[in-house]
Amino acid sequence: MKTFLRWLVLVGLLLGGCSPAVPTVTDAPAPPLPTQALTPYSSPTPRATLTPGWSAGTPTPFPSPTPTPRVHTVTRGQDMGGIAFLYGITIETLMDANPDVDPRVMSVGTQLLIPAAAETSTDVIPSPTPVGVLLGPLNCLRGRDEGAWCFIEVKNSQAVDVESVALVVRAANNQTGDLISQTAYSPLNRIPAGQSLPLAVSFPPPLPASVTFGVELLTALPVPADASRYLDVEMSDPQVEVEEGGKSAQVSVELRVLGGLPAREVRLAAGAYNALGEVVGLRTWQSGDPLEPGGVLPVTINVYSSGGEIETVKVWAEARP
């Protein structure tokens, strides 16, 4: 019996040695990929290297206009035309924003309200194209203080009235070519069709010893036929007394407003002319009280010559409701 058991164990060992071996699975490294040489090329739109703090070309929207206007304080040598150009607005816009400021007598220290629309404007607002008017010879007279007064007559050759007439007068330094510009405004708001009106502007001292003066039309706007902002005014024949030596003249007139509306504003302009017909002086006057229909307003003013003798004096009047 023991012999049989031994034989059985021996047979089992022999059979186990004949069984196929089970392989052991191990992670073998992947074969290396074949290397390839890279060919450099230029992209159609090369990218820029960004510097910290800069954007990648993203547009930043402009800020919206602020409703808060600013105030400009007039300094020496400035006029309303130059200030309007500085802020990119028209003279009319600046005058509308400052109705109590007369550009003809604006002094240093005057504060002008600049409309808010001009604060963030990136483009200069063009002035309206002026209608055609005729400019007479420019007569510039140097003063003893080394300044100058320039006078010129403007004729409205149109079939309609024109208003807001302004000229740019320039003084060019003949040595350096530097330009000094001043704006001349019409002494009255309106120039009726077919009529003329002198304009004047001063250049404060000191001016260079040798300058050349020139003039250019800046604005002249047609008055609509149905406009009601002017009243018909009747003026008596002017009484003119030229002082001895022709340096000054006194003018007296009487004004009446026609129609049924009172005149809130009455203006008078007196131009002095020499024997050659050149303008040598200009004086304006404005009423402080309204003129009722049927009322008579006597006016007396003096006009002075900036150079040469006064030969004749012309007078114009204007009334507004």
Image: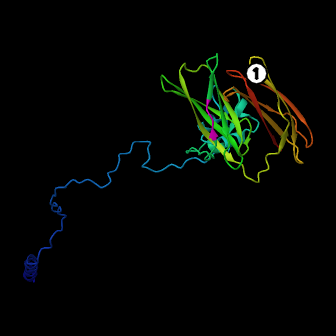
Q: Residue at x 63, y 23 (%)?
A: 141
Viewer-closest of 69 and 321: 321
x, y (%) of residue 211?
54, 24
Q: Is residue 46 left or right of residue 280?
A: left
Q: Amino acid at mark 1?
A: Ser
Quarter of the rendering occupied by the N terminus: bottom left
- Where disc 1 sits, the SS reads strand
Q: Nearer the viewer, residue 295 or 138?
A: 138
Q: Quadrant of residue 198?
A: top right
Residue 219 visible to an observer of this rendering? yes
Point out the residue furthest to the right here: 294
Q: Is residue 134 above or below residue 106?
A: below
Magenta range is 134-138
Nearest the viewer among 220 and 289 is 220
Give the x, y percent position of residue 12.
11, 79
In the rendered view, does 297 fall on the left or right side of 145?
Answer: right
Q: Which residue in the protein does label 1 denote?
A: 248
Relative image position of residue 44 (x, y in whole percent):
30, 55
